[in-house]
Amino acid sequence: MKVMIVGGGGREHAIAWAVAKSPRLEKLYAAPGNAGIAEIAECADISVMDKEALVAFAKEKAVDFVIVGPDDPLAAGVADAFLDAGIKTFGPRKNAAIIEASKAFSKDLMKKYGIPCAASETFSDPEEAAAYLKTLSAPYVLKADGLALGKGVLICQTLDEAMAGIQEIMVDKKFGSAGDQLVIEEFMTGREVSVLCFSDGKTILPMTSAQDHKRAKDNDEGLNTGGMGTFSPSPFYTPEIDQFCRENIYQKTIDAMRAEGREFKGVLFCGLMLTKDGPRVLEFNARFGDPEAQVVIPRLENDILDVMEACADGRLDEIELRFADNAAVCVMLASDGYPLSYEKGLPISGLEKFKGDSSHFVFHSGTKLKDGAVVTNGGRVLGVTAIGSDLKSARASAYEATGWIDFANKYMRNDIGKAIDEA
Ligand code: AMP
Ligand code: GLY
């Protein structure tokens, strides 16, 4: 099978790594890929948003199966472009990717179908939003409706701060048209867990759980980022909670999307808050999480191509998902200054130490090849993942392996997996 992956981050590297293990793979392509993906795939320098060029490349190479990784192209209909060209594709169509691309849509869906989530109201008029805010008490949760690189959620401790947030999002349009609508939501407390689920539109199969660390600094301080590290499984996601979520969240959501004429095929990422009143949905994403993918995929025992193809074909009921009875921890190595400003183009050393190691992996997030050498090319640079028999040994092993890598301005959180000690 000839396979093409759209994307060039750590998630796509983890997917590429799993696809490359499949005995069914004949040839792997990626667009645009990165320096890590280039070791296992032929990379084409095509933007993830350039539908015509992506489809033309896939046709030229006679690609049999396309995997679309990131949110932006899914929201823009890149999966539709491949499907409409007759190419089998993993990833939801635009009309289903809206579950991530519009928070107003996903809140309406959850309310209509009784899927547990925080109480909320949606506004398109800043004055009405401000008037509503005054009836609430702190902390205030404001969410820009559209995609905003994971930065469109504000948790405000004072009314003044929340009013300024309305101004920034709805009036100053800090996130562009993503701020045309604003969701104001009840503040919830509890443990957060990410559960990524494969779906073919009818059947939904949850993967093993994971926990992300979204803030830039230790002790969950600093700005929100795309994710600074993950561990899997979450010790707080018990079998009872899993059972509740299967019945009340995962299956209900897939059925709701089908009932709305928005069949969801691909990965439905359920961001959950485990509140004292039970699990509640924080957000849905229409793709693998990153860096969640970097701890979940290495634990998957199935041939990932079998599972993804079954999603595309509507045969997921034939698949039994299997995950190894172990644990994984990923620590992101970032460029100091991320998520604001940071240098690029700095040489990276130590990558060769991971070669042939079956319990340590380095997935490239923001790298590229320059004159044959691997250099930094993003805020999040590399994800260092270790597999261990349990979470504590995986964590120690991941932190040890972060020391194998060096580049100027290397920055990481030192408390990834701290919650493990509280389990
Ligand atoms: P989201 O992109 O919706 O997952 O929001 C980003 C982060 O904001 C989440 O991971 C939570 O930590 C926090 N958050 C979002 N919604 C709420 C809420 N209703 N109550 C408390 N925290 C929230
Ligand atoms: N790690 C969170 C996300 O991928 O959205």
Image (cartoon, rainbow, N blue to C red):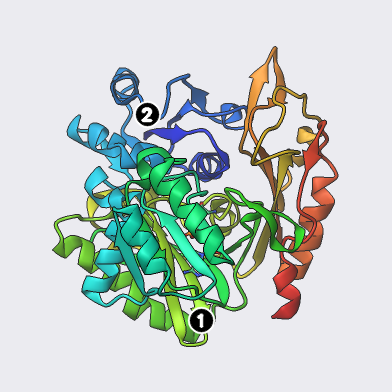
Question: Identity of the amino acid at label 2?
Answer: Met
Instruction: Name which quarter of the figure residue 243 lies in.
Output: bottom left
Side of 196 relative to 75 (left or right): right
Given the image, on which type of amino acid does mark 1 rest? Thr
Count of numbered badges drawn on the protein: 2
The residue wearing badge 1 is 275
Pinpoint residue 135: horizontal percent, then vertical percent: 40, 74
- Tell me what residue is drawn at x 77 percent, y 61 percent: 415
Figure check: 284 above or below 238 = above
Task: Judge whether residue 208 can be spotted in this image.
Answer: no
Horizontal and vertical percent position of residue 339? 64, 41
Considering the numbered disc 2 on the image, is that residue within a helix, a strand or a loop? Answer: loop
Whether tag 1 and tag 2 are in contact, CB under 8 A, the answer is no
Q: Nearer the viewer, residue 281 or 80?
A: 281
In depth, the one of 415 and 62 nearer the eye is 415
Residue appearing at x 74%, y 64% in the figure:
219
Query: Looking at this view, is 147 or 11 the one in front?
Result: 147
Quadrant location of the C terminus in the rendered image = bottom right
**Separation of residues labelled 1 and 2 (CA atoms):** 38 Å
Pointer 2: what residue? Answer: 49
301 to the left or right of 81: right
Q: Residues within 10 Å of mark 1 (few under 14, many from 20)?
A: few
Whether residue 61 is situated above or below residue 207 in the rendered picture = above
Crowdedness near tag 2: few (<14), some (14–19) or many (≥20) residues, C-alpha within 10 Å: some
